[in-house]
Amino acid sequence: MLCFRNLFKLPYSTLSNMKFFIDTANLAQIKEAQDLGVLDGVTTNPSLMAKEGISGDENVLNHYKAICEIVDGDVSAEVISTDYEGIIKEGEALAALHPRIVVKVPMVKDGVKAIKYFSQKGIKTNCTLVFSAGQALLAAKAGATYVSPFIGRLDDISVDGLGLIEEIRLIYDNYGFKTEILAASVRHSAHILGCAKIGADVMTGPLSAILSLLKHPLTDSGLAQFLADHAKAAGK
């Protein structure tokens, strides 16, 4: 694909470093990623909350607040409603929990309308369940802070997830959209590196995907050799 930005040597829409978000509701994993020193935020959803046994409105809200106390960056908290009034009501309640909360809104017609409302109110949003460049374009037009293309789920049905990131990057750069591309459903290190090469602003995935970037067999064998040589020299 001949990219407009490459042809004219234009920079990406953001000059900041690629952000690493962790996609979980597990406090221990969030803390481990935070302690690693590379974590920029958290994404969560009802499925991840349920996985941790978090249920009931009050417990869910308290869990969001607990996450916000661990991390320094944005925390995406997802609404359950799919109608405009319900999304607005839930979203405003979530945004009031903590300054770090980003309201996660589904890519549906009323969701796009709600994103426009939130953007006018200065409330950050993350448009989720995006699977096409057209959907990403609508989200950006409505003023979404983040758009979340699910690359792993596209790969699952033999569609090029990274190709979608590239399409969105091209469109956003063509028109100077400020919406950040948050590559979601990231499964492994190849996804992360692919997103970094294309120019995704953010990636979100499990702790295992982040930690997989540490691994290389030559690093392991080299370190083992260094330690063996040191032990041998120290024993003389």
Image (tube, helix red, strand yellow):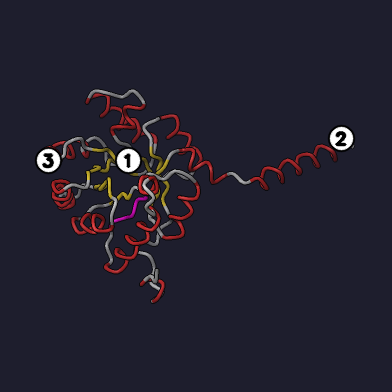
The span shown in magenta is 179-184
Q: Which residue is drawn at 38% across and 42% down?
A: 72
Please check the rendered image and state whether residue 67 is part of the magenta-colored stretch, yes or no: no
Q: What residue type is labelled 2?
A: Gly
First reached walking from the N terminus: tag 1 or tag 2: 1
Is disc 1 placed on a helix, strand or loop? strand
Asked if labels 3 and 2 touch by Cβ distance under 8 angstroms, the answer is no
Front position in the image: 29 or 233: 29
Residue most toward the front?
158
Between disc 1 and disc 3, whose residue precedes?
1
Where residue 75 is drawn, which disc sits there? 1
- The secondary structure that most of the magenta stretch takes on is strand
Q: In this view, does 111 lie to the left or right of 210?
A: left
Mark 1 belongs to which amino acid? Val
Q: Position of residue 185 (x, y in %)?
A: 38, 44
**Which residue lies most toward the right here?**
236
Q: In this view, does 55 lie above or below 113?
A: above
In this picture, residue 142 sits left or right of residue 20: left
Q: Which mark is residue 235?
A: 2
